[in-house]
Image: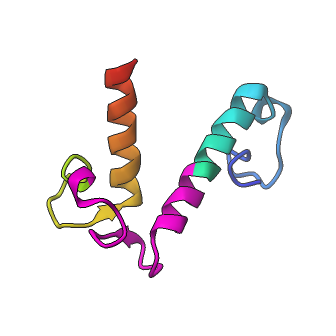
Amino acid sequence: FEALDSNGTGAIEASEFSSEALADARRSIMKQHLFDRLDDNDDGVLTPDEFPPRRMAGLDSDGDGKITREELHDGRTRHWRKAG
């Protein structure tokens, strides 16, 4: 529901209920679900024992050895822009 209620009114308006909005909401939910499945200890970050270390280098933008939700999202966005 929150993914579709883009203006935060607590209701889904006609302009928020389109095939594009539904697709965006589905992608957002899937990304959240993927991160949650990878984050074994539920600490909100991915560490080398939860995520392949060879892939972390391109995603760990602040170099702290951990991947946040934002870093994962930003890295995937950069990847798809390069591929597209």
Query: Is 37 situated above or below 23?
Result: below
Q: Magenta region: which residues?
A: 31-55
Whether residue 67 appears in magenta in the rendering, the answer is no
Query: Is 80 situated above or below 55?
Result: above
Q: Which residue in the rendered view is the most extreme toward the top?
A: 84
Whether residue 54 appears in magenta in the rendering, the answer is yes
Residue 17 lies in quadrant? top right
Q: Nearer the viewer, residue 36 or 49?
A: 49
Of the 4 image quadrants, the one containing the C terminus is top left
Residue 52 left/right relative to 24: left
Q: Which residue in the rendered view is the most extreme toward the left?
A: 63
Q: Nearer the viewer, residue 78 or 10?
A: 78
Residue under the point 69% across and 34% down? 23
Residue 67 left/right relative to 29: left
Indicate the position of residue 4 as horizontal and vertical percent values: 73, 45
Residue under the point 77% across and 27% down? 19
Residue 63 lies in quadrant? bottom left
Indicate the position of residue 16 as horizontal and vertical percent values: 76, 35
